Image (cartoon, rainbow, N blue to C red):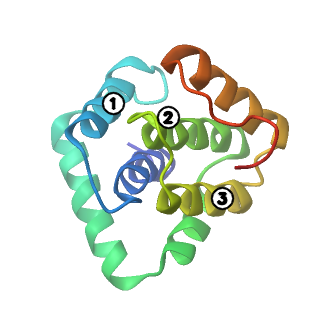
Amino acid sequence: MSKEIDSIVEIMYLAANSDGNFKPIEERVIFAKINTYLPVFKGTDQKQITRIKEELRDRIKRQSLEQILDYYAKNISDSLKITAYAYALEICARDFELHDAEIRFLKLLYSKFKIPKSAHQALLKSINIRCITKFDTTDIF
């Protein structure tokens, strides 16, 4: 896998851990994304995911969240930044609420990746429709 794809997988794990409570459903959502969304994750297997998680643990010990997201901003192409943001947003919303820590993480990712407000609003609207939630789509959180 490329650094770009590794970074997207790491972002999903950071999103799942952003509220300090990594839930089994979040792990299932990550695996579902990896197993469903081709060609982005083509050829990714459990061994690679384990390696990525270990590298992320090491990165977290050495760098701040801002530094980590700066690294991702450099390694992920503009065309996949919205994709990575969409995955992170969906993982955070998977328990049908956005916790304060998740919102802080998503705001930072939104800013670092320069996500268009219209894309953010569309993603929240999609989550509202699919998950029957009522996240505010009029503003960035």
Residue bearing the label numbered 3: 107
Calculate the distance from the C-alpha at mark 2 to the C-alpha at mark 1: 9 Å
For label 2, the crowd category at 10 Å Cα-Cα, with few meaning under 14, some 14 to 19 and many 20 or more, is many
Question: Badge 1: few (under 14), some or many (20 or more) residues near its Cα, within 10 Å?
Answer: some
**Residue 61 percent coordinates (x, y):** 31, 81
Q: Residue at x 60, y 23 (%)?
A: 128
- C-beta proximity under 8 Å, tags 2 and 1: yes
11 to 82, vertically: above or below? below
User: Is 15 or 71 nearer to us in this picture?
Assistant: 15
- Image quadrant assignment for residue 43: top left
- 137 relative position to 5: left or right: right
Corner quadrant of residue 54:
bottom left
Q: Is residue 136 left or right of residue 134?
A: right
- Judge whether 58 appears above or below 69 on screen: below
Up/down of 87 relative to 4, above or below:
above
The amino acid pointed to by label 3 is Lys
Q: Amino acid at mark 1?
A: Val
Badges 3 and 1: C-beta atoms under 8 Å apart?
A: no
Q: Residue at x 41, y 33 (%)?
A: 94
Give the labeled residue for mark 2: 90
**Secondary structure beneath label 3:** helix
Amino acid type of the residue tagged 2 in the rendering: Glu
Q: Of callouts 2 and 1, which one flags the residue occurring earlier in the amino acid sequence?
A: 1
- For the N terminus, give its image quadrant: top left
In the picture as drawn, the residue positioned furthest to the front comes out as 134
Is 127 in front, or is 85? 127
- Name the spot of residue 104 as percent of width and height, x first: 58, 63
- Residue 118 occupies quadrant: top right
Residue at which label 1 appears: 29
Marks 2 and 3, how far apart in space?
14 Å
SS type, badge 2: helix
